[in-house]
Amino acid sequence: MKSAKYAMLTLLMGTLLFFIPSISNAETATYTDENNIEWSYTVSGNSITNLVCESKSATGSIEIPSTIDGKDVISLSGGGYNKGAFQGCSGVTAVTIPDTITTIGNYAFEGCTGLRSVTIPNSVTKIEGSAFRGCSGIATVTFSNKLTSIGEYAFSNCTGIKSITIPNSVTVIEEQAFSGCSGLTSVKLSDNLTKISDRVFEDCKGLTSIVIPNNVTTIESAGQLFGGAFSGCKGLRKILIPDNVVTIEEGAFKDCSNLTIYGNNGQASKQFAEENKINFDFIANWDRGSSGSDITAPTVKNIQLTYASVMGYDRDSNRKMYIVPADAKLVINVYFTETIKGTEAPTLTIKFGNGQNIELSNGTVSGPFISYIYTIKSTDVGTLSAVDYKGGNITDEAGNSAKLSCPALELQYGSGDLVYANGTVTNPNQSGGSGNSSGSGTGTGSGTNNGSSTNNGSSTNNGSSSGSSSGSSSNGGSSSGSQSSSSTKKDPTTASGKIPQTGIGAGIVLVILSIAGIGTFSYLKYNKLRDI
């Protein structure tokens, strides 16, 4: 223990001694130029660093000095909040950056909302984090040809930028560098990038098309919950992903509802598109689609029952089904891969359980989806499913006819959840007969009914049944056959005197906890004796 403390103290002293020379050589000074703009800076050898404009109320065009007292100004101040060179100078409309500057520091121009255009001289090799963050007035940016890296949030929320071309000398663009640039419609990336960082173009809603450079191997994401490189790019319709890309992380294209991924067979691009139900096309078709005409037909992405349709109803004991009664309104949305239009919606066919097919032709087109409304009838009994989808005259905005398909119906926000109409049983997943019949009376057995029944247990049905069983049931119809004494079937997910859903006895758990406690105590005791 003592030796570790001595080592830590030695390291701290060594670090302090390392920085003493640079601290002693640094000198802070101020300077007022011919336009009465006051500057503060640090003299470091024969150079001026960390230049700051102290005249925060300055307006109009500002020219940054290239030299002060014969020394070149090589960097604009960064390093933290309220330390940026022009941070918060909202009245500045234009800045001339001299070609002596090599680094634009953190927060250098953050919040300069009046700034209209920026030219980065060829001497600049690095733009640090949040350098132009929130400069919403910037419409154009010209980058240095010698630029190698762009820091995180560097141009975040610069909503006025329309297009950017990143020079090929750039090897790194850090996360969220252009996030929130909602006016951005065109991006040309550096050929020397090896990854597309997490959320780098997040919420760039105006971006419609982008080509990933050939040297990129990874498109990053913080996960499906937070999104990734292009999450929230709702206008993004086309992205070309070359074969060198071997990793596309989950959530990279979260909320890109109109996207088509262009790639090749056997590559990560195609696999990702299929796994995430994103429309896919081949790179060979990219140029044809970019030549002025859209040739990609819209396709069905998924069919979802809105969560609002069922959120107020109870679920079965396994929590996998919502039990929805008659007169409840269901809203079913069919989502397409791009914005669609049409005067006649296709017919969506649904059914409940083994009941008859129900055709819905009352669809309303809205953006990339068609919405259908159905009111449940008392005769609808069983699990809701989609059966067919056909007809109509739906096209995309370029006139390409939609390709219709009928994927399995999903519940919005659900994970395998289903909907059961007019169910009164405890667990609709239990086996039993189903069908259509009528009558009155009480009985048990197997047969045809409007609900479901369970042998050797209890169930509730809305029809008639015949046969024999050793349980009990209650029907809204007639039945015949023999019965034996009633019994109550236990919930299979619990066991008396044991932990639910595991079957592990409470005694076994106590033994395991005791062993873990003894082991922990012994380990701590051993470490204490060893330190002595």
Image (spheres, helix red, strand yellow):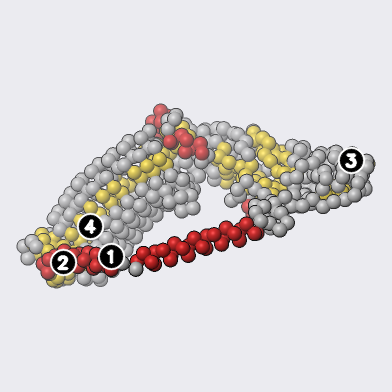
Q: Can you identify the residue that label 1 sits on?
A: 4
Type of amino acid under label 2 = Leu
Q: Nearer the viewer, mark 4 or mark 1?
A: 1
Type of amino acid under label 4 = Ile
Image quarter (top left, top right, bottom left or bottom right) of the C terminus: bottom left
Helix, strand, or loop for circle 4? strand
Q: Can you identify the residue that label 2 sits on?
A: 17
Ranked by sequence position, the earlier of labels 2 and 3 is 2
Tell me where residue 507 appears, x and y as whole percent. Answer: 64, 59
Q: Can you identify the residue that label 3 sits on?
A: 468
Helix, strand, or loop for circle 3? loop
Q: Are marks 3 and 4 in contact (CB under 8 Å)?
A: no
Ranked by sequence position, the earlier of labels 4 and 2 is 2
Classify 10 Å Cα crowding around label 3: few (below 14), some (14-19), many (20 and above). some
Residue occupying the point 31% across, 49% down: 173
* Real-space CA distance between mark 4 and mark 1, rounded to the nearest whole angstrom: 41 Å
